[in-house]
Amino acid sequence: MAEIMVIFDFDSTIIECDSDNWVLDDTALTEKFYQLLPTIPWNPLMDRMMKELHSQGKTIEDIVEILKRTPMHPCIVPAIEAAYSLGCDLKIVSDANSFFIETILQHHGVWNCFSEMICNPSHGLVIERIQNSMAEAGKKKVIYIGDGNGDFCPSLKLKESDFLMPRTGFPLCDLVSKNSNQIKAEVHGWRDGKELQHVLLNLINKAIEEGNNTINNNTLQTISLDCKLLQPPIPIDTHQPLPKALSVPQ
């Protein structure tokens, strides 16, 4: 059953920070990085910082140890493992460094749960390509999980049958609130890894039930709620009703 595709952003979604900044902070290069940033694009500048670390005697193994300490909510790994075990096709679409992503996910034992990692893409075009491949493979739904400005363009590409999970209090959620008339997908916010796990697994189960034509129409209710408002704490129990959908103001 790979009719459901779950697409994750990485920084501030799977992990609790920006992975580039995590490495810069740990190696005392943050100040220098931001001094140079006005004159050098982000990715070439990160390459330059990595070369500087090498010149200082830092090894790949040193960087790997830094990445292993990257903060991640304890519910994220179980959420990924559960989605994978339920037969979902998991992908990462992110601006983060591919080596950083792979190293962190390997450290947590979930790298093999993902079928594809797409880094530094034109997000909207990537989603269109994924949607075309889904149609060819007979997949029916996308669940998109993200937080940043770069996640807004792919959010616009989602269909009415899809789900969008923006992180509350982050730029994507603000953009969704301000441009809700352009969003076709059903929107469900989340604040932390615990809520991500709960919402994601319930959406997957809902999609599976819909696919089997056994959906309970009372499982999900819709209310008017600003995406930026915080929801009450949600217990981690996939048998509990899904948090109410966010119908953001027009």
Image (spheres, helix red, strand yellow):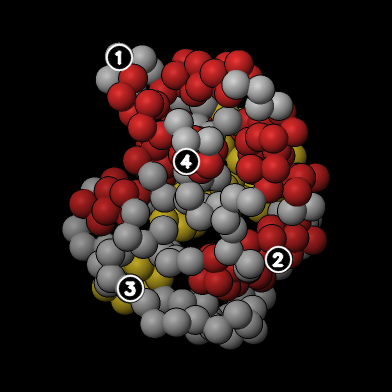
Q: 10 Å neighbourhood of mark 2: few (<14), some, or many (≥20)?
A: some
Which residue is under mark 3? 230
Which residue is under mark 1? 39
Q: Is residue 179 above or below residue 232?
A: above
How many angstroms separate mark 3 from mark 4 (CA)?
A: 30 Å
Q: Identify residue type, mark 3.
A: Leu
**SS at mark 3 in the image:** loop
Q: Identify residue type, mark 4.
A: Asp
Which residue is under mark 2? 78
At x 46% / y 58%, what residue is drawn?
165
Q: Is residue 73 above or below residue 108?
A: below
- Give the mark toward the camera: 3 or 4: 4
Q: 10 Å neighbourhood of mark 4: few (<14), some, or many (≥20)?
A: few
Answer yes or no: is residue 132 visible.
no
Tell me residue 92's x, y (percent): 61, 41
Q: Identify residue type, mark 1.
A: Thr
How many angstroms separate mark 2 from mark 1 (CA)?
A: 41 Å
Q: Is residue 125 left or right of residue 132?
A: left
Q: Earlier in the sequence, mark 2 or mark 4?
A: 4
Q: Identify residue type, mark 2.
A: Pro
Q: Earlier in the sequence, mark 1 or mark 3?
A: 1
Q: Earlier in the sequence, mark 2 or mark 1?
A: 1
